[in-house]
Image: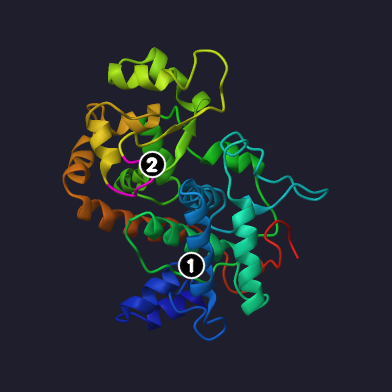
Amino acid sequence: MRTNSLIACIGLVVLCSSLANGQLSSTFYDKTCSKALSTVKAAVKAAVAKEKRMGASLVRLHFHDCFVNGCDGSILLDDSSNITGEKTARPNANSVRGFDVVDTIKSNVEAVCSGVVSCADILAIAARDSVVELGGPSWTVQLGRRDSKTASLSGANSNIPAPTSSLSALISSFSNQGLSTKDMIALSGAHTIGQARCTNFRTHIYNETNINSAFATSVKAKCPSNGGDNNLSPLDVQTPIAFDNKYYANLRSQKGLLHSDQELFNGGSADSQVTTYSNNQNTFFSDFAAAMVNMGNINPLTGSSGEVRKNCRKPN
């Protein structure tokens, strides 16, 4: 059926693209929940106004969701007698946050149209709105994802790239999700906002040489060689709560906080794209927006697959 639809839509670029991407559509809720986007936006605006860091946390939730069996809201599921969730996975435990904000958004959306808008779509919209609130680009979010009824702890442990990743490992990790190296470098620019825990950058600042010595010394004040694992440091030392292209300028000055960050500018194949983004914020913004759409299209559940959860933390 889907193959026939694709053949029939040749020439209708938008429709073909929508069908190829699991039938996601920018107008999915126009008739069934016309206030969905404005409701999410208002809640994100309030959450980011209360705590700037929450913007980065909401973007990260969408990323960590999409890299485990697609953008299906699985990261939001709590452990239960029937489900081992993803929240305790190595990349997520004591790290991924914003679940209470998602609960609030979901509650607000349910109040205007019950049982219509999926938690997976809420994550996609909230990521876009968070970037905009912090000064970054906007993009048209494709919608129509449904929510999974289960989660994958093993998938979260194996699919989400680690902060110790090499450039080749990063390229492979994103390629496994259907994302290009260009997408990977652009999406890494989300690290222009947010913070990281000491345990994730200790080795880089103490044991590695491709790091600015003054920068390393300043970060060591927040991250002792022993203890303080959960102490935080901004991923972008210049403008930690502004979505801009300073992350790439930092990499060119060897001020990447994570090993995986600095791998993007370390004499390898990513250097030229990092240089381009550090010199041209508009190019970065455009590529980031396109890459976020691509990421949001990773294996969505659509049609009769999955469900629309009433509570993002548990299946219906």
* Image location of residue 233, percent across then percent down: 44, 31
Q: Does residue 8 sit above or below 81 in this rendering?
A: below
Report the residue that reaches farthest toward the front. Answer: 50
Secondary structure beneath dot 2 equals helix
**Comparing marks 1 and 2, which lies closer to the viewer?**
1
Tag on residue 70?
Answer: none
Which residue is under mark 2?
191
Q: Nearer the viewer, residue 236 or 167?
A: 236
Highlighted range, magenta? 239-244
Residue 187 showing in the rendered view: yes
Residue 305 showing in the rendered view: no
Q: Does residue 1 sit above or below 228 in this rendering?
A: below
First of labels 1, 2 by sequence position: 1
Q: Quadrant of residue 36?
A: bottom right
Q: Amino acid at mark 2?
A: His
* Image location of residue 46, percent across then percent down: 51, 61
Which residue is under mark 1?
41
Q: Is residue 69 left or right of residue 153?
A: left
* Image location of residue 283, percent across then percent down: 21, 54
Q: Does residue 147 sit above or below 55 in this rendering?
A: below
* Image location of residue 231, percent across then percent down: 53, 27
Q: Quadrant of residue 221?
A: top left
User: Image point 48% across, 46% down: which residue?
Assistant: 53
Q: Quadrant of residue 70?
A: bottom right
User: Image point 49% across, 47% down: which residue?
Assistant: 60
